[in-house]
Amino acid sequence: MERELVEFQQQAAQQVVDLAEKLQHCNMQISCAESCTGGLLASLCTDLAGSSQWFERGFVTYSNLAKQQMLGVEAETLQLFGAVSEQTAAAMVRGAKARSQADLSVSITGIAGPTGGSVEKPVGTVCFGFIDAANQISTVTRQFAGDRSQVRWQSALFALQQLYRLLD
């Protein structure tokens, strides 16, 4: 378990370097809206010297109220679909881009555990939202295995990989 966590951390660190190079080459910036990762993605990005050239801002919206106040997620969306849903991830990413100067944005909302899961949405369920420079939104749900730390690191790594792919 510990070895897997170290591997996720190493992969994420390399992915940030790759993403930074590509963003700088394209003269673009990103923003992020995080829930279950609690700012891990923003921290990974800003750990890299010079990140202010390509990382515009991050929102940590752990509570539903924060999602509403900071990102404009509608209460109805949260009530109908829940905080962990592709609909909420789409609303979060839309809000992150609208409230920043970023060209691309990502949102992450999920259940890192060890509690909080259900039959429909077990621990490890994470929903992502992505918005590109043309304001096209895509969402995806992934199921990650492992403990709380591993779920959070896998989520951050997946977000970085998908942001990189958006630039292709």
Image: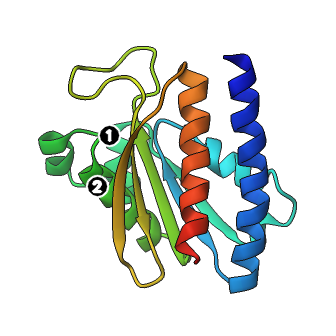
Question: Dividing the image into 4 quarters, which one contains the C terminus?
Answer: bottom right
Q: Is residue 116 visible?
A: yes
Question: Dividing the image into 4 quarters, which one contains the N terminus?
Answer: top right
As drawn, the label of residue 64 is: 1
Label 1, secondary structure: give it.
Answer: helix
74 is higher (above) or lower (below) than 134: above
Looking at marks 2 and 1 on the same chain, the residue that comes earlier in the sequence is marked by: 1
Q: Position of residue 7 (x, y in %)?
A: 74, 34
Quadrant in the picture for residue 20: bottom right
Q: Disc 1 marks which amino acid?
A: Asn
Q: Nearer the viewer, residue 29 or 158?
A: 158
As drawn, the label of residue 73 is: 2
Which residue sits at x=80%, y=50%? 47
Mark 2 and mark 1: Cα distance apart in space: 8 Å
Q: Residue furthest right?
A: 49
For mark 2, does the 10 Å Cα neighbourhood hold few (<14), some (14 to 19), or many (20 or more) residues?
Answer: many
